[in-house]
Structures are given as structure tokens and as C-alpha cells.
Image (tube, grey):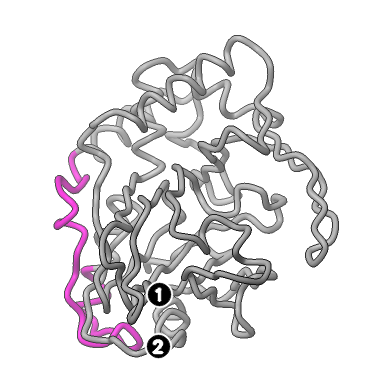
Amino acid sequence: MSSPFDLADDDSYQRWRDAKLAGAPRTAADLIVEVKDPRALSASEREALATRIKNCNMAIYASPMLEEDSDILRKLGTQFGLNQLDANWLAGEDGVSSIRVFDGGTRKHYIPYTDKPIKWHTDGYYNPPERQIRAMVLHCVRDALSGGENRLMDHELCYLLLREQDPAHIKALMQPDVMTIPERVDENDGVRPAQSGPVFSMDADGNLHMRYTARTRSIEWKDDDATKAAVAALEALLASDVPQVFKTTLQPGMGLLCNNVLHDRSAFTDDAQNPRLLYRARYLDRIALD
């Protein structure tokens, strides 16, 4: 089967590259679709979201839904074939996580549940292959007093720009042992064994998956020159001001629907009376567009 993500198939890559660049959004505003109710999209609303996801693996909806209701995420997800929630141990009983500042308990030890910045990553980079996070919904109930900005980048465009620089970077980042998350022992989660895997890989349907974190602690890169060069190139790309990186701060009622694209978060300051609250649903499914 031909694939633009096969380094040996340059013809498919060139055709895909031209179409990808032609269809890519130019600004963060191009990602936004106004919807009345994300739990029950109209045909035109769903089509508008699907078009953006087809072009860049993500879309942002803006709605008047301001209540604390995690059903918003799950009902939106089912309209795009998202049914297999990754109910990780820090999620709620319904499999949806409340992303807010926790001053006590286990969550306060994990950066998403603090007001600190989060570096570039894709979700679930520490998961085994059978639990790869392929899609995600992030819904804003309350924004912060200041800060909390996200940067977003389509992982396919990241692949494209790195391959344009040097296909050897892609070859290195596709090695099955290029990135290892060491074993971790947690009093609640038990032993999480070391997990090695590629940064870029293809699933059974030929879709590109990316597994990455910019963290420097609790991560081990393969010790060879090709890997070092590829990781440096990736870090430089994400630190640059390329137009393929979008900056946005989700406002109440807004949400991100994506195929687990690269993202980060800036530090923020809470309003003590109305602290920041986002819901996050992570899926083992990929978004279905048909």
C-alpha cells in the first residue's frame, strides 16, 4: 500500500505534501467553528469541523455551553466515532478528567493539575502501543485570570517540515527504540514498566501517529548521532516561530477536537473565586470523518 509516510515512497509523499500545504489553515482563527450545541451538532456544523480536521487534524468549536457537564465531551465524541475512552486512573468515573489546580492529594504532583507550564507533547506518550491515544477533546468551562495559552501543531505538518529538512531525521525518529519512558512505581497506579517506541509511526490504516514529549526528565533517547540530530531538529522546529504553530487560549464554551496533535500550555494565574477548569477526554479511537 502506498503511503506518504513511507520514506521509500517519494511520489506519494510529494503529492501528499503539496495537498497538505495547500489545505493547511493560515491562522488559529481558521480553526474555529461556531456551534449551538456540541452535544448535538447540525450537519453543517459537523461538516465544518470535519473539514478542518481533515486538513490539519484539529478543529476548535465555540459554543454557549458554560455548565460543568462532562457529557459535552462524550456526546461530541460519539458524533465522530470516538467511543473508546482511555479511562486513566486520574480521570473521573465517566473517564473524563477535570483539569484544574489541585492543592492536595495525588494530582498535585502531576503538572497538568497545577498552574505550571506544560512543555510540547502528545498525550499518552508513556502508554503501551495497545493504549495509544489517537484522539482528544479538551473543553473549557472556565478560563484563567491570565495565562493558560495553548500552542498547537498538526503532527503531520511537523513530520513534513522535518522531512523537508532531512529525511534522515524521520528515519531516526521512526526507530522502534528511539524514545524510552523509564519504569515508574506509583503507590496508586502500581508499576508502570519502561516503555520504548518510535516518535513517528503508522497505524494499520496508514495514518501517522506521533509520540513525543519535550520533557528532559523521565525520558531516555537512543544514544546515536542520528537520533541526537533528529531530536535537536525537532526541538528547534518547535521553538521556532513557524506559521504552522497556532496560539490560542480557550474561552468558556470553547473546545479542541483533534487527532492528538502536538500541544503545550503556558503557566497561568487563577481567579480565586472562579478557578480555571477544563475537561479532557482521551480516546483510543481516531476521529472518523465519513
User: In the image, residue 124 lies at what x, y percent?
Assistant: 60, 54
Say which element carries label 2: loop
User: Contact, CB < 8 Å: mark 2 with mark 1?
Assistant: yes
- Write the residue at 54% across / 51% down: 205
Residue under label 2: 68
Say which element carries label 1: strand
Q: Which residues are magenta?
A: 22-48
Q: Nearer the viewer, residue 134 or 237?
A: 237
Which image quadrant: the C terminus?
bottom left
Q: Nearer the viewer, residue 280 or 187?
A: 187
Q: How many marks?
A: 2
- Write the residue at 69% across / 50% down: 129
- Write the residue at 49% across / 44% down: 208
The kind of residue on which mark 1 rests is: Leu
Q: Is residue 78 above or below residue 7?
A: below
User: In the image, residue 200 lies at what x, y percent?
Assistant: 54, 36
In the image: residue 158, left or right of residue 8: left
How dense is the environment of label 2, judged by Cα within 10 Å: few (below 14), some, or many (20 and up)? some
Residue under label 1: 277
